[in-house]
Image (cartoon, rainbow, N blue to C red):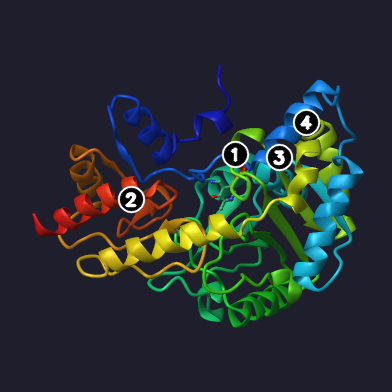
Amino acid sequence: MVSQRAQAIQPSGIRKMFERVASMKDPIDFSIGQPHFEVPAAIQEAAIEAIRSGKNRYTVTQGIPELNELVAGSLETRLGKKLDRTLITSGVSGGLLLSYLSLLDPGDQILLPDPHFVLYRVVAEIVGAEPVYYDLYPDFRLTRECLEAAVTEKTKVLLLNSPSNPTGAIHSVEELQIAAGFARDHDLTIISDEIYEAFCYDAPAPSVAEYSDSVLVLGGFSKTYAMPGWRLGYAAGPDELLEPMTLLQQFTFVCPNTPGQYALLQMPEVDLKPYVEDYRHKRDRLCDALANGYGPIRPGGSFYVFPPLPAGFTGEQFVEKAFERELLVVPGKAFSRRDTHFRLSFAVPDETLERGIEVLQSLTVD
Ligand code: PMP
């Protein structure tokens, strides 16, 4: 009954984790991929007002013009250049599906980072494309060599993710210039997932779109404004690509969430600095506490740390050991071909962070 496409999809490691959490009383949840704060009040109020004032119908496929203008304007400021067009999407996940459908035919190859956010691989499989990995271990830095080792004559797309899930690494200008040059030489389109762009702790994340025109930028509101359930994001880039993506959106998602789009017009009223400051503090506290025993690379952005597993543990053993102490972490295998690391999310209240640190420290001593 079920298609081969559907049969081929394996449940994600993260989902399995969510199922187990449900059985716990007061878990220390370091597995979450969403901010712990609430949607900023100005945006909440505007969403309620939008619903009350009848903003509940379909909008135009590409999203309301005012929100597109806001997104285009802030991208222009950030990138120092104007992109052809924007499209409001149903989250970055929606943008990923539309971009893969527009760029990849069955049998084409897409270069994905290893480690990577799991949707990159699964959506490739859904559209019949072949994921091929460029290896970012051990320091999560991008080199020409790691890209050249993965490219073939079937490669069509290079996917970049900075700041990264799960590593938190931010690609430097030099790395992005390498990626742009490599894509140019091999005639590849770049998809740049910049969903964690607002969460940078040492310096803003540069975008590869500053160094190449053949780039689709995917950005989101799920993390920035703590609204993953609202399903809103954006895509921006060349007309040539945005046109088919918009057409595909018309016949799949139809339009993005209407009251949410109106609520996001309040974005300029929201000061994100206190949230970012709070997460910088949490990053530093966690990385300092794990320096002995784990030695993680300090992430420049996102709200994840991706430490190596302590000696003698497989990912599964370590996750199980943490689980016995009510601490939830995600094994690196959920993001990677390797079973050498694990992912922690520090998007938690300080008190939870301290409880988790205590367990983590005890796990290397046991
Ligand atoms: N890209 C990355 C790197 C992510 O971590 C996530 C969410 N975990 C997404 C995209 C999808 O986000 P959304 O669809 O909610 O915008």
Which of the numbered marks, if any, corresponds to residue 259? 4
Task: Report the residue marked by disc 2.
Answer: 353
Mark 1–mark 4 CB contact (< 8 Å): no
Q: Is residue 313 above or below residue 142?
A: above
Q: Is residue 77 above or below residue 93?
A: below
Give the number of the mark in front: 1 or 2: 2
* Residue under the point 24% across and 38% down: 326
Task: Report the residue marked by disc 1.
Answer: 228
Q: Is residue 93 above or below residue 111?
A: above
* 3D distance between C-alphas at marks 4 and 2: 34 Å
CB of residue at label 1: within 8 Å of ligand 1?
yes
> Would you call the spot at circle 1 few (<14 residues within 10 Å), some (14-19), or many (20 or more)?
some
Quadrant, the C terminus: bottom left
Instruction: Kindly state the secondary structure of the residue where label 3 is placed.
Output: helix
Q: From where the camera sits, is residue 242 visible?
A: no
Q: Residue 246, position in %: x, y?
A: 85, 43
Foreground: 151 or 257?
Answer: 257
Q: Residue 269, position in %: x, y?
A: 74, 51
Indicate which disc, 1 or 4, sits on the residue closer to the N terminus: 1
Q: Is residue 175 above or below residue 352?
A: below
Instruction: Kindly state the secondary structure of the residue where label 1 is placed.
Output: helix
* 3D distance between C-alphas at marks 1 and 4: 15 Å
* 3D distance between C-alphas at marks 3 and 1: 14 Å
Task: Report the residue marked by disc 3.
Answer: 43
Q: Residue furthest bottom?
A: 174
Q: Amino acid type of disc 1?
A: Pro
* 3D distance between C-alphas at marks 1 and 2: 22 Å
Position of 3 compared to 71: left or right? left
Q: Amino acid type of disc 3?
A: Ile
Quadrant, the N terminus: top right
Give the number of the mark in front: 3 or 1: 3
* Residue under the point 48% across and 45% down: 33
